[in-house]
Amino acid sequence: MPSWDRRSAAAHRKARAAALRAQVVDAVAPSSPWWRERLATQGRTAEQVATPEGVAGLPAVGERDVCPDGDPAGAAALVLQTGEDGYALHAEGPRLRRALARRLTRPGAYAQVVEQDTRPTTFVWAGLSLQWPVASTRGDLDVVARAGARAWSVLGLGRGDVLVTALPARPSATSQALELAALGAGAPALAAGERADDVAEALWLLPATVLAAPADALAVLLDDLVDLGAPLGALRTALLLGWPSEAEREAVRDALERGGLEGVDVLGLHVPDGHRLPWAQCRASAGGPPQLHAHPDLELLQVVAPDSGETTDGAGELVLTQLGLRGSALLRWRTGDAVDGLEEGPCPSCGRTTWRPAGLRRAALVPVLALRGGLTPVDLRGVSGALAGRADVADWRVQVAQDRAGRDQLLVHVVPGPGADEGDVVVGVARDVRAAAGLLPTQVVVHAPGGLPGETGARLLVPA
Ligand SMILES: [Zn+2]
């Protein structure tokens, strides 16, 4: 059988369908309190949801759905919870047989297998407009390490590479994935922290071939390191974390040139928010349009219209369903990332047949806006959610604009429904936006029918 990244699209689909069924029927539906209740509210059974079409019928879910009042404690209900009895009922056949066989030969071993499969041992922080914890079991960390080893190979790195990362000390899925990727590849890695002095010190210790930092920070870091006289002669890869924009890539290329650093490829790596598996850019695409490789057998990717959450074939928000991960379980999860679409054919650069999110813009649906109160991440999906389906609003637009002082404004435009009182609509909309997105709009603007801004029919008007 061809390796994971060379199989046909049909083979990928078949493997995904089996993994999806196991994930939904055996793990998430019976053992995650949040999803159990969600499916019950939706009037759907695990069986109905356990196919790609079934998942697509579920409303997409984001952090505000799980933590509606902004309290991260809500995320605990995502975590699979099961004791020995529940495990026997719901574990997949081979795992259960393994556990039962061990119980025969070694008392206590069954409980060990159950615990290893379902007990969270490790937490990282996620969140775009609020911070919430993501739990992993020991088994999950194996999956993350496997995905990391794949990412390492997609990046064109080997055992001989040496990784220095410059990330904040707060544990994130990205820091966890990089650490496990290097471990899986048998390559040395040092998490130096985000301060340039500390990174320079790490570089004196380890001659890094790979320097990894957040996409919006690496260019400045390189300038600082050059100023500090840090040894960068071994550097072959500048790795931008969080899928970089073209401007961020260009800034890093400029910084490399200013520093006299030649022969360094600029590559990107991305862990979508809430997820734990790294997606990597293939090295073959370093010089051309960047190609981002996801995992065809460990995730189900779909795209939804950002204003309605409905499934679409074209551009929109990337939603994902994890396959094979326990701990915090995500089904049809809204990543906040915008994409132009999903590509499934062989990569034009490296030939791998994994699917590739095209034109990804990280956290585009939760932009950080410079509002009057300061820099604030604004969950535009929550703002839209507060407007969609209101009986007192006939139509609406959400617009990010700038005032004369250059500050961002969050404007909500509404056409009141027939018979609705304008004042009541404005108050009601403002209140519901605050409840759903954690902040008040700058202004709620009332329009007559036909007077809304924007021509394309898109309800989210966000500058590109
Ligand atoms: Zn490729």
Image (cartoon, helix red, strand yellow):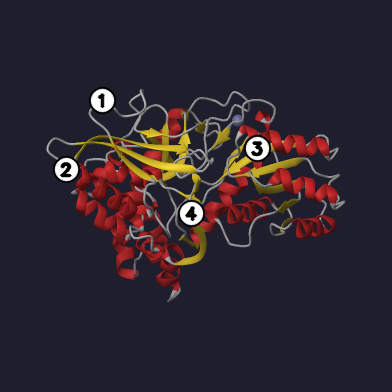
Residue at figure coordinates x 45%, y 72% from the top left: 109
Give the labeled residue for mark 2: 421
Q: Nearer the viewer, residue 143 or 400?
A: 400
Ligand 1 has an atom within 8 Å of the beta carbon of the residue at disc 3: no
Give the labeled residue for mark 4: 373
**Residue 170 marker:** none
Q: Residue most toward the bottom?
A: 107
Relative to 135, say whether 364 is above or below: above
Give the labeled residue for mark 1: 450
- Decide which of tag 3 and tag 1 comes sooner along the chain: 3
Identify which amino acid the numbered label 1 is placed on: Gly
| Spatial separation of the CA atoms under disc 3 and disc 1 | 39 Å
Identify which amino acid the numbered label 3 is placed on: Glu
- Decide which of tag 2 and tag 3 comes sooner along the chain: 3
Give the labeled residue for mark 3: 248
Q: SS class of the residue under badge 4?
A: loop
Residue 59 screen position, x and y as percent? 29, 43
Classify mark 4: residues with Cα within 10 Å, few (<14), some (14-19) or many (20+). few
Mark closer to the observer (2, 1) = 2
Q: Nearer the viewer, residue 151 or 221?
A: 221
